[in-house]
Amino acid sequence: MAKQTGMTKARIFKELGLKARLQGASTGGGWFADSGDWLESRSPTTGELLAKIEQASVKDYDRVMKEAKQAFLAWRAVPAPRRGEIVRQVGDALRAKKEPLAALVSLEMGKILTEGQGEVQEMIDICDFAVGLSRNLSGPTLQSERPKHRMMEQWHPLGVVGVISAFNFPVAVWAWNTALAWVCGDSCLWKPSSKTPLCAIACQNIVSEVFARNGLPLGLSCVTIGRGATIGEKLVNDHDVPLISATGSTRMGQRIGGIVGQRLGRTILELGGNNAIIISDKCDLTGALASAFFGAVGTAGQRCTSTRRLIIHEKIYARFMGKLIANYRKVKIGDPLDPKTLMGPLIDEGAVADYEAAVKAAKEQGGKLLYGGKVLAPFGRKTFVLPTIIEIDNKAPIVQTETFAPILYVMKYRRFEQALKQNNGVPQGLSSAVYTDSVAEGEAFMSYLGSDCGIANVNIGTSGAEIGGAFGGEKETGGGRESGSDCWKTYMRRQTNTINWGGEVHLAQGVEFKP
Ligand code: UN1
């Protein structure tokens, strides 16, 4: 296993400071835990035990939070460009560890190596983005209605940011949050998915070294690996955490949003997607084919942005489906660390059960299986599935739900307005795309009458967004935005300043108030 890349488990562990037994709480200066409650990290490919991690207890959480709060107080006083310089070093440290970290993502999460490398590249890219941002966390100067007055906006550090991340992007989503939070002057506490604890430990080891080398408070980067019911609840209920950024299912987001909203905290929620590509009769079918194939089969359908639905013009439907199924037949399924593999395993048996249940439900709801629908066990463990295509009506209940597996629902349309309606006719609103050479169709898709999603692409697919844009979506996707554009603003507190430089007091709105 994993020999083809030169990255054996032993080498990955050595390069990233991992061992067979680890502990799950860190304030940057090493690891501790006193719960006596052990978590196993197993390879989704073979089931091999990778390591055991003692989970953080509530007491460990309190210790970590104390450090995170102290670190914030020191860090907020460091000039932002100097904070950017530290994040530049974090980016360099990630560059140096790109190969083993990408291999660890493949080993523990199961995505193929090129996608693991792409994920680490996203971390490096967001660091570069944050470095530039650190010299431009700017607010506008505004015109005052009062004579000899000036108004302006400033952005100040916010506090401790809680990051809750999912298994499917076990390192990049944390980096999207932390790189921005750090240049914004915040400290961070990360609760990673319990399905990918080693990825979190490796990241923490890489960044802690940078903070230590620079003599900075180590609590800037904190981690608690533990149960949702203990550590997760504690974090979302913690009044000392002004912002919770959470990625996961809509159900999880509804719970977190409710709790944080109750205490009037801030959230960035990046939840389920149900992403469609409309394939027009006026498009380059080769491009549409490549994008649909990557979107639906890439990462074994375990991206928030995975293509889950194709809405295809009836005139080209048969031709397009013939080509797509031919591609599906060629998918090489196996060890994600083997460079020849195109699709690795699903994360665990639970994910496979969800896949099987969805295929069954789709058939019961009038769906026609065009390809796949089978569970495989190339290494003796039923964590692999065939990528699957089902022809079905958009309104079928199963099509309305997000199943985190490589199942693609396909449907036809005749008029473009009908396709738009189908695109928007689901509860989720993350990503969407249209393949068309018609300017009118492309513009309509991106317009206020078009896609209701946070991401709406023309002639590229639904997945694989760049870090420079704001990432997130509407409706049940949660409304949060992470990563590029002006998303940094959520990690800071806005302050409006009005300055009187003329001496005379003028009340706004013409109010007179004299004794
Ligand atoms: C996710 O699946 O949670 O756009 C993030 C993409 C990646 C990020 C996905 N850049 O597919």
Image (tube, rainbow, N blue to C red):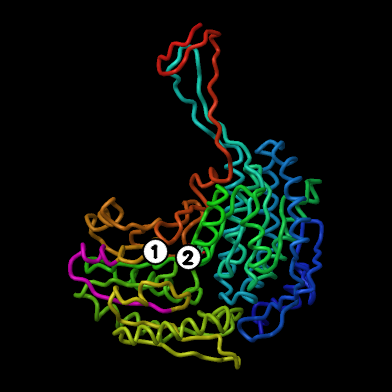
Label 2 Cα crowd, 10 Å radius (few <14 / some 14-19 / many 20+): many
Residue span colored magenta: 407-422
Mark 1 vs 2, N-terminal side: 2
Q: Which mark is residue 449?
A: none
Q: What residue lies at 27% left-to-right and 67% top-to-bottom?
A: 422
Identify the secondary structure beneath mark 2.
Answer: helix
Identify the secondary structure beneath mark 1.
Answer: strand
Asked whether, in this view, residue 50 is left or right of residue 509, the answer is right
Magenta span has 56?
no
Query: Residue 252 appears at what percent x and percent y?
Result: 53, 65
Q: Is residue 448 visible?
A: yes
The residue at the far top in this view is 515
Dot 1 and dot 2 residues touching (CB under 8 Å):
yes
Query: Residue 69 appears at what percent x and percent y?
Result: 73, 47
Q: Which residue is mark 2?
A: 250
Q: Residue 204 versus residue 132: which sits nearer the camera?
A: 204
Give the residue type at disc 1. Answer: Gln
